[in-house]
Image: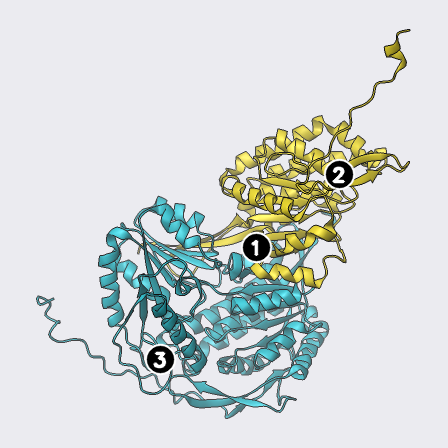
Chain colours: A yellow, B cyan
Amino acid sequence: MSRDSESPRLSVAKTYKLYINGRFPRSESGRYFSLSASNGKLTANVSRASRKDFREAVVAARAALDGWSSSSAYLRGQILYRVAEMLESRSAEFVAELRDQGRSQARARTEVSESIDRLVYFAGWADKYQQVFSAVNPVATSHFCFSLLEPTGVVGVLAPERSGLLGLVSNVAAAIVGGNTVVALASESRPLSAISLAEVLQSGDVPAGVVNLLTGFRAELAEHFLSHMDVNAVVVCEHDPVIDDGVAATSAENLKRLLNRCDRDWRTATDPYLICETQEVKTTWHPIAP
Amino acid sequence: MSHDPLSSAPWHYASAPEATDHVLLDERYELFIGGKFVAPKSGEYRPSINPANEKTLAQWAAAGADDVDAAVAAARRAYRSVWSKTKPAERGKYLFRIARQLQERAREFAVIESMDGGKPIRESRDVDIPLAAAHFFYHAGWADKLEYAFPNRSVAPLGVAGQIIPWNFPLLMAAWKIAPALATGNTVVLKPAETTPLTALKLAELIQEADLPPGVVNIVTGDGTAGAALVAHPGVDKIAFTGSTNVGREIQRRLAGSSTRYTLELGGKAANIVFADAAIDEAVEGIVNAIFFNQGHVCCAGSRLLVQESVAEALTAKLKARMASLIVGDPLDKNTDIGAINSREQLQRIRHYLDVGVEEGAELYQSAADLPGKGYYCAPSLFSGVSQSDRVVQEEIFGPVLTIQTFRTFDEALMKANNTRYGLSGGVWTDKGSKIFKMTNQIRAGVIWANTFNKFDPTAPFGGYKESGVGREGGLHGLDGYVELGHRRGKS
């Protein structure tokens, strides 16, 4: 027997990073928080994003907005579908990661399959929600008047805590299929899927800055999501004492849209109204010559 | 001009006053709560002033927090005991009936609207009142068809809606608020603006005559404290507010994170963009309509004129000539183009901004209109030589004050148009269809008029992007602010 076969191979652990503007930095602050498995063994040292990381993510999301929102519905649908393909091909890894974060094998499997299907679901809406939810308005004067949907802009997502992958995927997909760009804060107790999802988004050809994913503490970052003057909407998925009335009130400074998605069952969130909630209705009037 | 046979004989308009003898106003109006007119617990009354001559038209009750509480309780009772049990089709028939009665009494309402708020009778007669009736008629038909508005969902009312409206379109705003709320099965507490309560109170009389069940609509006149009490009331499920961005921000501060829903229709500073290839004479008429309609007391007014440089000089000359021909004066005169400023406070605010503009170095042109000696009036005003960062370019003045800037390229026009915290409306004037779509696609605003301006219709959703508000009113999309969606049985 050789020495080599006596020593078991040491696995290479992944360093979990943030995802900002298509790149994978650790937090500029150098901070981290540790996740442990139920047996107490270290799972990962997760990046703990700072306010500055968040602000850089908003800058990236704003910069990506023009290009993404003006890309065709067909293209956005195909990109979302491509993300589903990438997730499918890496599903075993996502299942293992959810298991590391406390899910049973069966439930982890279900969550990953549902996440893939959710991406396909929203990919299919890309070139349909406009048809279903816009309107031609039969005004009484001689005008052609119509109302269509346009993305609200930069959407902040405070992702669901328990549904670490499926909840995140549902919120991000609903926002970006409608042409918005996103800065999301991952589940605090199940953050690993978010960063692996970022790798999937990147390899799925989602342009840099369209989705930015942060890991860190809601207690620290929620107030920055709500008060940032260049964020147009914030999706709140958790009842959380840190998002008290005072913090929520700061959203009024730029009248950002505040969307309460607490208490949603993400397993049944096949819901085009999630797309509509991060859309603005624009009404245009054209005279008809007499 | 010397070839013009009319030039030696300028137009003189004989006065054409609208008759007021058919209008009956009480000396004093009470609060409309639970289907009855009741004295305010506050015991307080205030005068409503005709801004055209500063005379008192009537006294109105100033509701306190107790009165607001009573109105909310009446709305809740009506919701529980009657309105939520009324068949949707029957709800709709009440609204049809209100629409019809409003049409029958349209002229009376138009005259009162002009007396109370100062707007020209031509506008109250041809725009405000007909549109108010149309809003009731449009929403009436939705009452039993709501499932078609929200595909694959069940639709339920929210409960009691608290609604706060401004003084620029008093009856029309009441209709914008009440009609969709009732059609979707909610009951209402409406607070009119303190300078223009009268047509809402006349509407209360009409609602009583229409036999709407008591408490379904309650109208409490009052000032900002009554509005604040309504916003803070725990028995209110939804607040719908139209007014200034500052008050809207206060409301969101108060309600963000709570279970009370809200929609906000707030201020604006709309760009009205004229390209060199536009029909210039039509554009001039459109510019006048965009900013001087209703004395400029319009949240979606085209208050920032952007003109392509090559036609700026010619257009400005035509615009000034047109401004000089506008008749400013008695709102009840059918010749009047620009009526009275709504209140002394608003006139002071406008004058303040005229001073600010001059101090900032802008050049002020005002038409030499003959202003009446009594009442609140402001001549149509145009600031040129302004820069993008000037306060008169950035802040909402809410009066007959226009700024003019020039641009060379499409991108420059777009950048200037979007360089604002607001996003309510916009206008584009060009002969080229593809350019219209390119511009209307990129202006970040909720309502865009191409080769027209300030058109409204109950079927057309209205509302702002950015700091101009949250949510829409009117049309298919306006229903969303008054309903809770659920899953249809057996479906997902």
Query: What kind of residue is marked 3?
Result: Tyr
Residue at image location 80% in from the left, 40% down from the top: A34
Which-is-in-front pick, marks 3 and 2?
2
Find disc 2 in the rendering and name its residue. Answer: A46
**Label 2 lies in what chain?**
A
Instruction: State left or right for residue A215 relative to residue A78.
Output: right
Up the image or down, A258 lies above or below B100; here it is: above
Picture quarter with the N terminus of chain B: bottom left
Find disc 1 in the rendering and name its residue. Answer: A229
Up the image or down, A261 lies above or below B238; here it is: above
Find disc 3 in the rendering and name its residue. Answer: B377
Establish whether labels 3 and 1 are both on one chain. no
Label located before the other in sequence (2 or 1): 2
Q: Position of residue A7 (x, y in %)?
A: 88, 16
Q: Pick whichever, B44 or A222, lies toward us.
A: A222
Q: Position of residue B11 (x, y in %)?
A: 18, 76
Query: What kind of residue is marked 1?
Result: Met
Up the image or down, B346 lies above or below A191; here it is: below
Query: What kind of residue is marked 2?
Result: Val
- Which residue sits furthest front? A30
- Which residue sits furthest left? B3
Label 3 vs label 2: CA separation? Answer: 66 Å
